[in-house]
Amino acid sequence: MSNIFFKTALIFVPLLFNAKVHTPKVVCLQTQYDTHTIEKINRVKLQLGIGKQSNGCEGYGICNISSESNAEMIEVEILSIERNQISMALNTESQKKVKNYFGKNGFVLEESFELSDDSVKKLLGIDFLLIEKGFYEIINGKVTFETKITKE
């Protein structure tokens, strides 16, 4: 009985000292930056060329990103762009191309990729995009790359 009384008393102690009681609130982690960018890029489809940029598109990596359609490239749909990552969806055909090329269910980037196509930057509403080297697994038709991004 005294244990219940003690716990109940602890709730009211801050009120005795005129302190504010803070109740937990759900905080939206998405920033104004993220919301702006996501709205701007909604349903943008791009093409990824595979291969290392520094090696004439040979080897493992992303060689280029384009808004122009090309049957040899991997089609992706941009899902979101945040400060440190970009998420993309891949259709079944694109997922097969990735698996055939890399031998894995994901992208292997032996080097970081810097986007140089100004028309794609404008389409995405960004000034700079660098995708970090590493392995990026495709899960349920989606891949998220670790990036460095600066916005317009």
Image (spheres, rainbow, N blue to C red):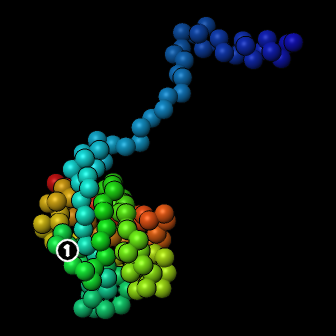
Above or below — where is 25 with respect to 109? above
Q: Quadrant of residue 54?
A: bottom left
Residue 30 placement (x, y as % from top left): 37, 43
- Locate residue 141, reporting x and y percent: 44, 65
Q: Quadrant of the N terminus?
A: top right
Q: Name which quarter of the figure residue 45 lies in.
A: bottom left
How many discs mark residues in the rendered view?
1
Answer left or right for 88 relative to 36: right
- According to the picture, the residue beneath numbered tag 1 turns out to be 69
Q: Helix or strand or loop: what does disc 1 sit on?
A: loop
Q: Residue at x 31, y 67 (%)?
A: 76
Q: Amino acid at mark 1?
A: Ser
Task: Please tell me which residue is depicted at 42% across the width and 78% down the height of the picture.
Answer: 96
Q: Residue at x 49, y 76 (%)?
A: 105
Q: Position of residue 98 (x, y in %)?
A: 40, 79
103 displayed left or right of 65: right
* Residue 100 vertical position relative to residue 131 in the rendered view, above or below: below
Q: Nearer the viewer, residue 109 or 66?
A: 66
Q: Residues within 10 Å of mark 1 (few under 14, many from 20)?
A: few
